[in-house]
Image (tube, rainbow, N blue to C red):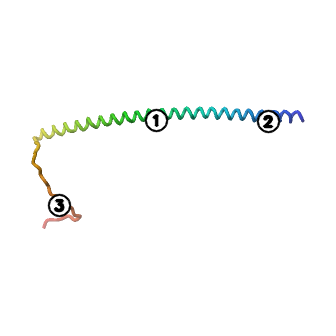
């Protein structure tokens, strides 16, 4: 019986040491993994920020070309309907709004 207790006494510190080394190795691997993932996320965020800027720039260019085309179309419509610019100012008066509909008597 005594040899079994001696071997158990020897294995217990060795088993604890192996477990501690295993936990230390796992923690080191997890540290390296999370560190590399944080670097990857920073790089991805920078790339997405650059892509967003490029898309915003493209949208601004498309809006500018749309406005330019809209003015050209407006000019063509005004010319085709023989409209002309006037230098005279016309003022229009507005009656105060009311909640009740007025009917003519």
Quick one: label 2 or label 1, which is nearer the N terminus? 2
Secondary structure category for the residue under label 1: helix
Q: Residue at x 15, y 57 (%)?
A: 93
Residue that carries the numbered disc 2 in the rendered image:
12
Quick one: label 1 or label 3, which is nearer the N terminus? 1
Along the line of sight, which residue is nearer the eye, 93 or 98? 93
Q: Residue at x 50, y 34 (%)?
A: 41
Secondary structure category for the residue under label 2: helix
Q: Is residue 47 left or right of residue 73?
A: right
Q: Within 10 Å of the Cα at label 2, are there few (<14), some (14-19), or many (20+) other Cα atoms?
A: few
Q: Quadrant of the N terminus?
A: top right
> Between marks 3 and 2, how big is the CA–CA gap?
99 Å
Q: Is residue 25 left or right of residue 37?
A: right
Residue that carries the numbered disc 3 in the rendered image:
95
Secondary structure category for the residue under label 3: loop
Q: Quadrant of the C terminus?
A: bottom left
Residue that carries the numbered disc 1 in the rendered image:
45
Q: Within 10 Å of the Cα at label 1, are there few (<14), some (14-19), or many (20+) other Cα atoms?
A: few
Tag 3 and tag 2, C-beta contact below 8 Å: no
When asked about the image quadrant of residue 86, the answer is top left
Q: Residue at x 39, y 36 (%)?
A: 52
* Residue 48 location (% of width, % of height): 43, 34
Q: Is residue 42 left or right of residue 22?
A: left
The nearer-to-camera label among 1 and 3 is 1
Extreme-bottom residue of the structure: 105
Q: Residue at x 47, y 33 (%)?
A: 44
């Amino acid at each position: 019986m005594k040899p079994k207790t001696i071997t158990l006494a020897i294995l217990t510190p060795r088993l604890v040491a192996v477990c501690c080394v295993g936990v230390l190795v796992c923690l080191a691997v997890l540290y390296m993994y999370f560190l590399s993932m944080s670097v990857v996320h920073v790089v991805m965020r920078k790339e997405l920020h650059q892509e967003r800027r490029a898309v915003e720039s493209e949208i601004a260019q498309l809006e500018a070309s749309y406005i330019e085309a809209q003015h050209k179309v407006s000019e063509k419509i005004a010319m085709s309907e023989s409209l002309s610019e006037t230098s005279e100012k016309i003022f229009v008066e507005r009656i105060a709004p009311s909640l009740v509909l007025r009917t003519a008597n």
